[in-house]
Image: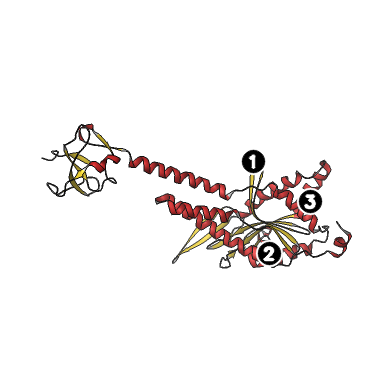
Amino acid sequence: MSILDTFFHKHFGPIILKENSDAEEFIFRMKDLSAKASGSLKGKIDAQIAAAEAGLAGEKQILFHLKNSGIDMVVMHDLCLEREGLFAQIDFLVMTRKHTFVIECKNLYGNIEIDEKGNFIRHKGYGKFTRKEGMESPVTQNERHLNLLKNIRLDFKNGSIQKARFDRKFSNFYRSLIVLANPKTIVNDKHAPQEIRNIVIRADQLAAHIKKTDADDHDTYPSNEAELRQIAEEILSYNKKEKSDYARKYEELLTKEFSNAKAEKTAPTNFPHGEQISNSETAKIRTEDTPKNERNCPRCGGKLVLRTAKKGANAGNSFWGCSNFPKCRYVEAEDSNT
């Protein structure tokens, strides 16, 4: 630490060391998949897109407040830290001269209740009715993130004494924050434990909260820009891509859907007398313009039409087939009802 920086605390302002989010690439890839998918798979993909877009919108609000805070700090957005098979998906890691804040962003629709046990309960309105839903506690989520982050930082400490000292003071230096990005969300925390009420804030309160936390700490020796950058780079060395890899799951499901559709298209159709004809051969099946009698399919209610097999052992023989083929594959012999 330079003498000038120590005594005069040279201002370096917010440094956004990592601004991009893997969620942006994830959304792009998922939208491409959605355009190709159909049915229930498309619904699942679209739900993932909506959730990712809502989360990203909330994170952009937080990033705006951090950029305009005027605080000396290093900011890293959207980290997926991995250590020994354990992962921590951190929305923001904010390192000031005195503290490091692990921020969990929640862009929630509906109101939030926090009960006396610290449980988070969502209240969703449906017209005149309100439905309560339990949700995973973001406080518990952040506790897991902090534990992994502590182990990562310990990897860079030398000797048992240094490690023990860092472990003992970790909870003072590293703080958890739950930031609600939706300004319309109302939080009822009157019965919540005080330690939870202290860390659940709104996005527009974030900068003021960080400033007050640093100002109230008269014991911590302030770090300079170079020290914060070094620690940040050490943490970034554990960062992995996560969201884009998650999109692979849906790419694989879409590939499987295409394969199943292709197999169904070429699957053989059973005809009377045990004969089969593949769908690729149905182009060679002639449909008579006028059926002999008006009849309906017993399976789907569609019209039965009289057709003539042009290939196989039954070539030349007539049979009744559903007009909704290939969606409905019902067939019967021509003389089944005569």
Judged from the image, the secondary structure of the residue bearing numbered disc 2 is helix
Q: Which residue is mark 3?
A: 169
Which residue occupies 37% across, 44% down? 261
Front: mark 1 or 3: 1
Quick check: 148 above or below 93? above
Q: Amino acid at mark 3?
A: Lys
Could you tell me which residue is drawn at 78 percent across and 64 percent down?
215
| Number of the front mark, 3 or 2 | 2
For the residues bearing labels 1 and 3, Cβ distance under 8 angstroms: no
Residue 189 marker: none
Identify the element where label 3 is drawn.
helix
Residue 167 x, y percent position in the rendering:
77, 47
Along the line of sight, which residue is nearer the eye, 202 or 131?
202
Name which residue type carries label 1: Gly
Q: Quadrant of the N terminus?
A: bottom right
Q: Nearer the viewer, residue 317 or 208?
A: 317
- The location of residue 50, given as percent across then percent down, is 50, 58
Characterize the local packing of mark 2: few (<14), some (14-19) or many (20 or more) Cα atoms within 10 angstroms.
many
Asked whether, in this view, residue 76 is left or right of residue 97, the answer is left
Q: Earlier in the sequence, mark 1 or mark 3?
A: 1
Q: Residues within 10 Å of mark 1 (few under 14, many from 20)?
A: few
Between the C-alphas of marks 3 and 2, the distance is: 26 Å
Crowdedness of circle 3 by 10 Å Cα count: few (<14), some, many (20+)? Answer: few
Three-letter code, disc 2? Leu
Check disc 1 and report the residue beneath it: 85
